[in-house]
Amino acid sequence: MGSNATLNRRTFMARASLLSAAACLGWNRTAAADPPPEVTKVRLVKTPAICLGPEYIAEDLLRLEGFTDIQYVERDNNDAYPMLAEERADFTVATAPDLLPAVDAGYAITALAAIHGGCYELFGHEHVRSIRDLRGKRVAITSRRAVEYFYIASMLAYVGVDPRKDVEWVDGKSFDGTMQQFVEGKADVFLAFPPQPQRLRAAKVGHVIVNTSQDRPWNNYFCCMTAARSQFVKAYPVASKRVVRAILKAADLCAREPERAARLIVAKGYEPSYEVSLNVVRSLSYSRWRTDNVDDSLRFFGVRLHEAGLIKGDPNKLIAQGTDWRFLNELKRELKV
């Protein structure tokens, strides 16, 4: 049997498994009270991070929600927000550190729900042991608009280091490029996201300075959220709610059945290793969307970035401008199974 046939069979079996889980958990009943989506086409930005498993697992759940044309659009490195602004995509994954800078820069985006917290790990070489040690060091990023820039800048500001003056930002140009800069010793520090931390550990390169799923205060806050073009949310509220519901159901699956979720991620071709996929899914807090306040995370990062001079607007005003939790609050009541 050829590799394509094997992959197709694996994908078919994974989809059947997901639909079976949906039926068992009663998920296929929760959408019945809503009218059909105003549009049946939806485009999601495809980001090469397996911590975003709920977005990819949601593909078949989106079909149950009435979408017939579901597209995953390749991401322009770390520039997803321009893709929404140019109407090349409708939904993307935003992060708590970079959402408010994007809103402050004038992007018409709206965060709709949190997905999970704690997927990033800050790696350093032997001579870097703490966040304060980043002073004067080389830090690899994809761009000054990228999430890793704002995340690391928040960490620096939290300990009194000026991210604009006290570190050297190294342009790695791409996700793979930043890690390669670190591996080759051309950067001292690198913020990794799954599966990069797993690969660095396997290669025994560097050590972890901050694990945002374990270390305070970072483990108290969400990192990844679902966000959409503001115009899409305004024009198609039913479709928007249905997209969010599919992604949150997928997050529930990751939390309740990590083995099934890991197999789905592998079957869909997002990660070749089941062991790596399972390790990532088990390590993340996919059920926190039900209990934790998303505004707290945005405010925490917003205050740090505002103090560092990286956003001009008042964080509370930017939160009000760039979020809409109506669907999230409705779905918290709906998805009690």
Image (tube, rainbow, N blue to C red):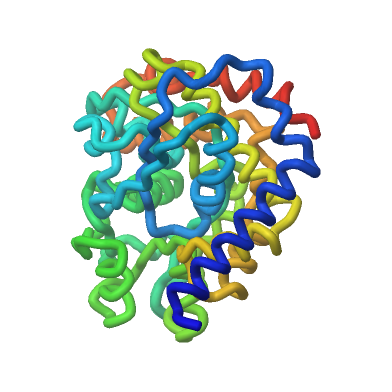
Query: What's the residue at 61%, 16% (across, down)?
Result: 34
Q: Quadrant of the C terminus?
A: top right
Coordinates of residue 8 in the picture (x, y in percent): 50, 66
285 horizontally vs 174: left or right: right
Q: Quadrant of residue 227?
A: top left
Query: What's the residue at 25%, 57% (across, down)?
Result: 142
Q: Is residue 214 something that shows in the picture?
A: no
Q: Is residue 1 above or below residue 321?
A: below
Residue at the extreme bottom: 203
Q: Which of 131 and 15 lies nearest the eye of the viewer? A: 15
Query: What's the residue at 45%, 22% (across, down)?
Result: 323
Q: Which of 185 and 147 lies nearest the eye of the viewer? A: 147
Coordinates of residue 305 in the picture (x, y in percent): 36, 36
Query: What's the residue at 62%, 60% (across, down)?
Result: 14
Coordinates of residue 250 in the picture (x, y in percent): 62, 45
Q: Is residue 300 above or below residue 143?
A: above
